[in-house]
Image (cartoon, grey):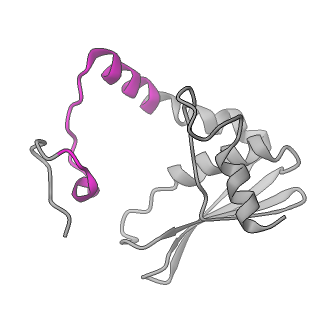
């Protein structure tokens, strides 16, 4: 099985990638599965100042869902412009805890969606946001 095939499988966990009813989608930059162990790498071209491993956790959950034989995942953010890595390890026995880490932010999104209230919050990612009428909007450089 080629890396490209693995990436396509990753995209189609549980059905069609573009299905309107899907609540999570992901495309992994690099996924290697070797028996009970997998490696997930997400390439980053920006700053390594604020590494955020939530994406790695979500990719690990999707990998566990698609590859039931995988028990352990070594994941990393690879900041290619800074020659640095952020490492995380995930284990199948911790699946419930990993899903629970997304519960509070998802509840907050549900509330915002149901009430159509989207309070702006300034973050280092404001330069990537397309909402130009936000008071924190920053055009991309």
Q: Quadrant of the C terminus?
A: bottom left
Residue 109 within the magenta-colored segment of the rendering: yes
Reply above or below: 95 against 108.
below
The answer to which of 72 and 6 lies nearer the viewer is: 6
Residue 118 within the magenta-colored segment of the rendering: yes
Place residue 16 in its image quadrant: top right
The answer to which of 11 and 46 lies nearer the viewer is: 11
The answer to which of 62 and 8 lies nearer the viewer is: 8
Q: Which residues are magenta?
A: 105-131
Q: Residue at x 54, y 31 (%)?
A: 23
Q: Residue 107 vs residue 130: left or right?
A: right
What number of labels is visible? 0
x%, y% of residue 96? 69, 32
Q: Residue at x 83, y 60 (%)?
A: 37
Place residue 56 in its image quadrant: bottom right
Q: Residue at x 83, y 50 (%)?
A: 71
Q: Residue 41 vs residue 20: left or right?
A: right
Place residue 68 in its image quadrant: top right
x%, y% of residue 28? 61, 58
Q: Residue 137 vs residue 64: left or right?
A: left
Is residue 90 among the parts visible in the rendering? no
x%, y% of residue 87? 60, 66
Q: Residue furthest top?
A: 115
x%, y% of residue 46? 37, 71
Is residue 44 among the parts visible in the rendering? yes
Q: Residue at x 40, y 71 (%)?
A: 48
Reply above or below: 92 against 118.
below
Q: Quadrant of the N terminus?
A: bottom right
């Amino acid at each position: 099985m080629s890396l490209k095939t693995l990436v396509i499988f990753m995209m189609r966990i549980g059905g069609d990638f573009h299905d309107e009813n899907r609540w999570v989608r992901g495309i992994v930059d690099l996924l290697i599965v070797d028996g009970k162990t997998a490696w997930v790498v997400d390439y980053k071209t920006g700053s390594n100042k604020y590494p955020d491993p939530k994406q790695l956790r979500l990719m690990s959950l999707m990998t566990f869902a698609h590859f039931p034989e995988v028990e352990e995942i070594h994941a990393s953010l690879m900041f290619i412009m800074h020659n640095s890595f952020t490492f995380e390890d995930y284990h199948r026995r911790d699946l419930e805890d990993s899903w629970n880490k997304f519960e509070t932010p998802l509840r907050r999104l549900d509330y915002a969606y149901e009430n159509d209230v989207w309070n702006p919050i300034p973050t280092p990612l404001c330069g990537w946001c397309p909402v130009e009428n936000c008071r924190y909007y920053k055009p991309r450089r």
